[in-house]
Each structure stands twice: as structure tokens, then as C-alpha cells.
């Protein structure tokens, strides 16, 4: 079950069996049904997670009750509400399973213990934070500089194996367009 997590870590840093056992000891397995939340906006519960199976959406609920989808996360990817996790602030985002999902989560406390027990995980942590910052920066640049059609085409190219898991409501929110406009984009492509 934890094989993909180990592979993800060991692509960047090697682990001994003892070090790996520390990681397994500190990770918690969570199984979520479709539409169950891993995290609720403005709560005090934040985790760093590695997705074993399934798909998640990270979004905010706006004052008018609409959703703004920020990210989708898929199998073998990490996800985290960075500010909440690292600075112990109320959560900024909702993180919801959009299909039956399995995830390994780690709390801030357990991550700190892991850094003490396996200091080389700090290097892996730095790589993860850099990757997350780049993804956030790229998402911002895409929203500011690309058309909805360009973002749609890039999304379906990058996630062709998962695009069928994302309904039109979520995809139009992610692209920042109406359902009707998304339908027009799909017809032209």
C-alpha cells in the first residue's frame, strides 16, 4: 500500500529500512468516499497528504456561495494547504474527494518528529515546497496570460487519463468560465 509513497520519496533521497519504518509509523491512512472532505475551509485541521488512489479538488467557497476550484490533485501527487500547515493558521481551502480516494496524511507534529528521526527528509521537504511554489506560480501565470481555451487544452493534455473524473461544473470553475462557455470550448476542440 505504501509502495508509491516510498517511490515518490526515493526518487529524490534514498531511505534505509529503519528510516522508511519511521515514515510509515508517522503516516496515517485515510479512506474517503466521493464528496467527503479531507479539509474544510476555516478549520484548524490541516495535513500534508500523498494520494494513493483517487482525485481531489482544492477550492474556496466564495461569499456568494459559489466554488472557485484552485487545483485538482491525482494519484501519486502530494497536496497541502501550505500556509495553514506550516503556520498553523485556519485553513484557506476545502479539499474534497471527487471520487472514492485513499490518502496517506501526516500532521505537522509528526512531520517535525520525522525531521528529527530522519534529517535527510528535510532535503525532500525543500524539494516538495519548491515544486508546490512553482505549481502555484504557473497556475497564476496561466490564469493571467492564457485564454480559457488554451488552459482547457493544456489541462486535457496533461491529465488525459483523469479528465473523465472531472465534471463540467468543477472544470468550468477551475478554468474560470461559465458552463455554457466551457461547452462552446469543447465543441470547438
Image (cartoon, rainbow, N blue to C red):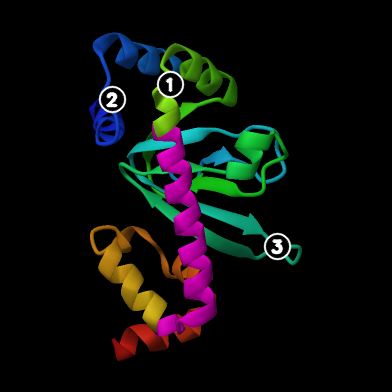
The residues tagged by marks 3 and 2 sit, at their Cα atoms, a distance apart of 36 Å
Position of the N terminus, as image quadrant, is top left
Q: Position of residue 53 (x, y in %)?
A: 31, 39
Query: Magenta segment: does it hold 71?
Result: no
The residues tagged by marks 3 and 1 sit, at their Cα atoms, a distance apart of 32 Å
Q: Name the residue under label 1.
A: 27
Is residue 104 visible in this depiction of the protein? no
The residues tagged by marks 1 and 2 sit, at their Cα atoms, a distance apart of 10 Å
Q: Residue 2 carries which label?
A: 2
Residue in the picture at 30% in, 8% down: 18
Toward the viewer: 145 or 159? Answer: 145
Residue in the picture at 24% in, 32% down: 7
Residue in the picture at 47% in, 73% down: 142
Against 187, residue 173 (above or below) is above
Within 10 angstroms of label 2, few (less than 14), some, or many (20 or more) residues? Answer: some
| Res 20 quadrant in image | top left
- State which mark lies toward you, 3 or 1: 1
| Res 8 quadrant in image | top left
Residue in the picture at 61% in, 35% down: 85
Query: Do callouts 1 and 2 mark residues in contact (Cβ within 8 Å)?
Result: yes
Q: First in sequence: mark 1 or mark 2? A: 2
Q: Which mark is residue 62?
A: 3
Amino acid at each position: 500500500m505504501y509502495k508509491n509513497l516510498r517511490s515518490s520519496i526515493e526518487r529524490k533521497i534514498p531511505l534505509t529500512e529503519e528510516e522508511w519504518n519511521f515514515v510509515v509509523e508517522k503516516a496515517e491512512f485515510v479512506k474517503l468516499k466521493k464528496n467527503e472532505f479531507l479539509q474544510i475551509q476555516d478549520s484548524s485541521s490541516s495535513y500534508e497528504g500523498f494520494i494513493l488512489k483517487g482525485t481531489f479538488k482544492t477550492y474556496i467557497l466564495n461569499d456568494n456561495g459559489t466554488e472557485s476550484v484552485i487545483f485538482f490533485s491525482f494519484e501519486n501527487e502530494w497536496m497541502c494547504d501550505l500556509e495553514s500547515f506550516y503556520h498553523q493558521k485556519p485553513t484557506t481551502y476545502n479539499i474534497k474527494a471527487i471520487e472514492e480516494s485513499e490518502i496517506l496524511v501526516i500532521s505537522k507534529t509528526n512531520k517535525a518528529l520525522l525531521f528529527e528521526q530522519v534529517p535527510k527528509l528535510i532535503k525532500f521537504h525543500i524539494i516538495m515546497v519548491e515544486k508546490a511554489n512553482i505549481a502555484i506560480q504557473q497556475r497564476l501565470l496561466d490564469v493571467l496570460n492564457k485564454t480559457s481555451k488554451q488552459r482547457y487544452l493544456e489541462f486535457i493534455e496533461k491529465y488525459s487519463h483523469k479528465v473523465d473524473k472531472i465534471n463540467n461544473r468543477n472544470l468550468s470553475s477551475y478554468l474560470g468560465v461559465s458552463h455554457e462557455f466551457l461547452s462552446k470550448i469543447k465543441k470547438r476542440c
